[in-house]
Image: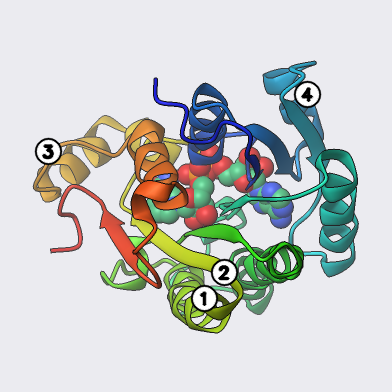
Amino acid sequence: MEQRFAGKVAVVTGAASGIGAGIARRLLDEGAKIAVVDIDGDALRAIYGDDPDTYAVTCDVSSCDQVTDAILDIVGHFGRIDVLMNNAGINTKSITDEYSMLKCTPEAFRRVFEVNTFGAFYVGQAVARQMVEQGAGVIVNTCSNAAIKTFPNGGGYGPSKAALTKMTMIWAKELAPFGVRVNGYAPGTTKTRFTEMIWSDEEAHASYVESIPAKRLGEPEDMAAIACFLASDDASFIVGEVFGIDGGQHL
Ligand SMILES: NC(=O)c1ccc[n+]([C@@H]2O[C@H](COP(=O)([O-])OP(=O)(O)OC[C@H]3O[C@@H](n4cnc5c(N)ncnc54)[C@H](O)[C@@H]3O)[C@@H](O)[C@H]2O)c1
């Protein structure tokens, strides 16, 4: 495999499962040293163990204080951050069964924003400050096609990712003069714990596959490929884009 990240340090949030774990694997395969960040420290330890190229940090990204400490800790350990994969996120379904517009509770609606929007902002800001000091860096936000396509009964999920999509563009424009490149990508339904209620149910799975032009769900490896492309020098002239990667599901 190409070694596009040899000598680079990357941070991956939400690295203990699904897309984040797929991105972390690909970064390691391409030569990076990585800080893996997640609220689930046990899962981080189970996946990454004593791998000398990884540094595991338990952190709830919705806590600004925890994020500040985590990024300081990572910079203390590796000395710099070249790439941020700003990926941790939750859906409303992981908090409550009441996620229609009529039934979603304020707490559930707020919690999704706290993680997906505020959490991404806290991590993005803390890392961007470090990158501006270095004079270089790349940020890749995990957005969602739910920001564009209207999936009913999603509670705050689509709106939280719509905000992140716009934040991606704003950060890109603000940070480019400092040598920091920002982009995002918008996964469609991808086979992870996040969508277990879909792929573990034969009927629901078939109906999703039928509605996706590519006739399959996404895999974490599909997302890792685009995230690592965007973080690499191959994408050096791409600024402020949010790439759809959903097999045509948004159409
Ligand atoms: N799977 C999909 O269909 C899909 C589609 C579009 C976008 N996404 C986005 O992809 C990203 C990754 O999702 P996934 O599918 O891999 O889900 P996942 O549940 O498999 O992984 C999410 C990871 O984020 C961590 N996490 C959750 N809350 C956190 C917090 N407060 N602080 C730190 N870590 C936290 C979890 O512990 C978990 O390890 C999310 O941002 C999600 O919105 C997923």
Quarter of the picture containing the N terminus is top left
- In the shown orientation, is residue 196 left or right of residue 190? right
| Sequence-wise first label, 4 or 2 | 4
Q: Give the labeled residue for mark 3.
A: 215
Eye-nearest disc, 4 or 3? 4
| Sequence-wise first label, 2 or 3 | 2
Eye-nearest disc, 4 or 2? 2
Could you tell me the amino acid type at mark 1?
A: Ala
The spot of residue 223 in percent (x, y) is: 38, 42
Q: Secondary structure at mark 3?
A: loop
Marks 4 and 2: CB-CB under 8 Å?
Answer: no
**Disc 2: CA contacts within 10 A as few (<14), some (14-19) or many (>=20):** some
- In the shown orientation, is residue 181 left or right of residue 57? left
Q: Secondary structure at mark 4?
A: helix
Q: Which mark is residue 179?
A: 2
Could you tell me the amino acid type at mark 4?
A: Arg
Could you tell me the amino acid type at mark 3?
A: Lys
Could you tell me the amino acid type at mark 2?
A: Gly
- The Cα atoms of the two marked residues, 2 and 1, are separated by 5 Å
